[in-house]
């Protein structure tokens, strides 16, 4: 009889995906407090062969060291900054993740935030709900910024950056980008985009959109020095990871009108702190980390997360391996 693997799942996945997992594994599903408290995680991961984790589960050295049988980690995310990848690899643990399927969803949300903050949609929603829409707006009142004809500067031209470039072109925006290395000329032509230095990007962009992984090199990449280089009329959009932006300095830049506004899906602390100054700023649109949150994408993420784990445990090639 084939060996059944023991696996830990740190929170609920789609039923169909869990059913697949149960066919091959003994599943321990955490249903309590989210994210699973570290003490419980350490306790539950001790004897399992594999774990399905989520971006808010910190799989660090301490956790991995406690997991003596662990052969595979499968994360329900494209980001893997919550996992100590080098340490896991040194223990020969395979790591799966879910890129590609969330590219469109995240790019859509990015475009949504751009339209929202430039055209002041959520701000208007607040005005109406707070019963403050007292007069019909005239020529100068409640004007936003037109999106078409503006320049978007994309930092990080990976899968999501490219999809944002495509969609932004469709809105009539000019697209420039900065990346560790320029993409091929073919891709640049196809996306109608041009590589520029980081400084030129800050200088020229009306909208700056971040599409980078979080690591020690991108920690607080966007800080007060960078805000000083941006146009006073520019907007910052972040759908990547919160810690790429120094949030305190962003708040200062917004208050001092060094930039005009921001659209954010990610924060230095999530859920966002209840007393965050961001909540008091009208020129900021805030989404609760929902870049990949569509029914379509989340179902695919569940399926891939399970497939990755089972393939890894069976010693086969993962669909997507870090
Ligand atoms: C990811 O997949 O990394 C997203 O940020 C998700 O939650």
Image: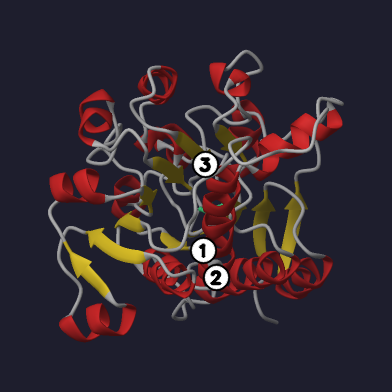
Q: Which of marks 3 and 2 is nearer the N terminus?
A: 2
Which of the labelled discs sits on residue 64, or is there none? none
Q: How crowded is mark 3: few (under 14 residues within 10 Å), some or many (20 or more)?
A: many
On screen, 283 above or below 69? above
Residue appearing at x 32%, y 33% in the figure: 232
Q: Distance between the residues labelled 2 and 1?
A: 5 Å
- In which image quadrant can residue 61 be found? top left
Q: In this view, does 126 lie to the left or right of 168?
A: right
Quarter of the figure that contains the C terminus: bottom left
Which of the labelled discs sits on residue 107, or is there none? 1
Element marked by disc 2:
helix
Q: Distance between the residues labelled 3 and 1?
A: 13 Å
Q: Does the residue labelled 1 lie within 8 Å of ligand 1?
A: no
Q: How far apart are marks 3 and 2 (CA)?
A: 18 Å
Q: Do the residues labelled 3 and 1 touch (CB within 8 Å)?
A: no
Would you name the residue on which mark 2 appears? Answer: 104
Would you name the residue on which mark 3 appears? Answer: 263
**Residue 75 visible in the current orientation:** no
Q: Residues within 10 Å of mark 2 (few under 14, many from 20)?
A: many
Q: In this rendered view, identify the residue nearer to me: 262 or 102.
A: 262
On screen, 252 above or below 158? above
Q: Are marks 2 and 1 in contact (CB under 8 Å)?
A: yes
**Residue 291 visible in the current orientation:** yes
Q: How many marks?
A: 3
């Amino acid at each position: 009889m084939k060996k059944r693997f023991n696996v830990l799942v740190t929170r609920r996945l789609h039923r169909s995906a869990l059913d697949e997992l149960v066919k091959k594994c003994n599943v321990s599903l955490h249903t309590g407090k989210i994210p699973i408290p570290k003490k419980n995680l350490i306790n539950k991961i001790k004897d399992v062969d594999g774990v399905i984790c989520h971006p808010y589960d910190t799989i660090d050295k301490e956790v991995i060291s406690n997991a003596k049988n662990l052969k595979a980690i499968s994360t329900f995310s494209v980001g893997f900054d919550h996992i100590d990848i080098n340490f896991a690899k040194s223990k020969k643990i395979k790591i799966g993740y879910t890129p590609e399927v969330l590219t469109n969803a995240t790019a859509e949300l990015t475009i949504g935030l751009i339209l929202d903050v430039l055209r002041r949609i959520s701000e208007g929603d607040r005005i109406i709900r707070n019963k403050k829409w007292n007069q019909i707006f005239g020529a100068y009142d409640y004007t936003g910024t037109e999106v078409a004809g503006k320049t978007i500067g994309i930092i990080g031209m990976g899968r999501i950056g490219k999809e944002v470039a495509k969609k932004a072109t469709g809105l009539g925006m000019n697209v420039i980008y900065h990346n560790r290395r320029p993409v091929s000329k073919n891709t640049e032509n196809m996306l109608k985009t041009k590589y520029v230095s980081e400084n030129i990007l800050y200088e020229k962009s009306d909208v700056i959109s971040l599409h980078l992984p979080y690591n020690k090199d991108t920690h607080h990449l966007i800080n007060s020095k960078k805000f000083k280089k941006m146009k006073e009329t520019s907007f910052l959009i972040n759908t990547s990871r919160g810690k790429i932006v120094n949030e305190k300095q962003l708040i200062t830049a917004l208050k001092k009108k060094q930039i005009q506004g921001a659209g954010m899906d990610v924060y230095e602390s999530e859920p966002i702190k209840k007393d965050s100054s961001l909540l008091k700023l009208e020129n900021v649109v805030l989404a609760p980390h929902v870049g990949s949150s569509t029914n379509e994408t989340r179902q695919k993420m569940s399926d891939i997360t399970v497939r990755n784990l089972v393939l890894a445990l069976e010693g086969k090639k993962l669909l997507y391996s870090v």
